[in-house]
Amino acid sequence: QLQLQESGPGLVKPSETLSLTCTVSGGPITSSGHYWGWIRQPPGKGLEWIGSIYHSGGTYSNPSLKSRVVISVDTSKKEFSLKLSSATAADTAVYYCVRQDLQLQIDYWGQGTLVTVSS
Amino acid sequence: QSALTQPASVSGSPGQSITISCTGTSNDVGDYDYVSWFQQHPGKAPKLMIYDVTNRPPGVSSRFSGSKSGHTASLTISGLQSEDEADYYCSSYTSSTTLVFGGGTKLTVL
């Protein structure tokens, strides 16, 4: 059974970079039929797609966040990562890592991790 | 990209059927059969209920069904049960190779 686990600091200072890693277990990260992505959910609000990466490194990002987002993958560690620069309080959210098919439909979710942006 | 449009809330009594709509545009729901529906209970990660507009993953009750007409996709839950009370989100692939979500619908089982 595929499992995804997010890790990273739960508190980030304003203007700093929010960094998270997702570790994949129970299945390959090099699957030809899947992307790996990040979704976030501010407290009490809805879901927002941040971006996705293929195991070869190709990425797609939400246009509203694209200038601040870097998504990378390390297939040897079965990990992919998110970096969101110039963080503000508006970036406070539960961040989920997910597996997606080639049309970006999500089939597996991590448990989510709360990141708070505050001084 | 604009979010898909869902009603903020719907309600129904046990045993009844309810339908949640998800309206997009010709750039997403209207042009692609890549609409998914997710169920989210408080404090939990979302769970995939429907993909490719109409398909149920293994283990999802047949009481959940999906459909699409034009720019609007729909999730129908029949034989409503108390455990169906949750937030529901739709998502769609878009022509810009992005993913867009609906704003979410809170289902209350009366």
Image (cartoon, coloured by chain):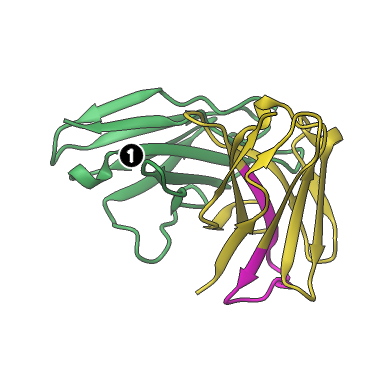
Chain colours: A yellow, B green
Q: For mark 1, what is the residue?
A: B86
**Whole-percent x and y of residue A117?**
67, 32
Q: Residues within 10 Å of mark 1 (few under 14, many from 20)?
A: some
Q: Nearer the viewer, residue A57 or B20?
A: A57
Q: Nearer the viewer, residue A18 or B66?
A: A18
Quick check: can you spot residue A100?
no
Q: Which residue lies at the image location 77% right of the left edge and 42% below the top edge?
A: A61
Quick check: can you spot residue A116?
yes
Q: Is residue B68 magenta?
A: no
Q: Which residue lies at the image location 74% right of the left edge and 37% below the top edge?
A: A62
Q: Quadrant location of residue A12?
A: top right
Tag 1: amino acid? Ala
From the viewer's perspective, tell me whether residue B58 is left or right of residue B98.
left
Boundaries of the magenta span: A23-39
Relative to A74, does residue A19 appear above or below in the rendering?
above
Q: Which residue lies at the image location 61% right of the left edge and 55% below the top edge?
A: A98
From the viewer's perspective, tell me whether residue A36 is left or right of residue B90.
right
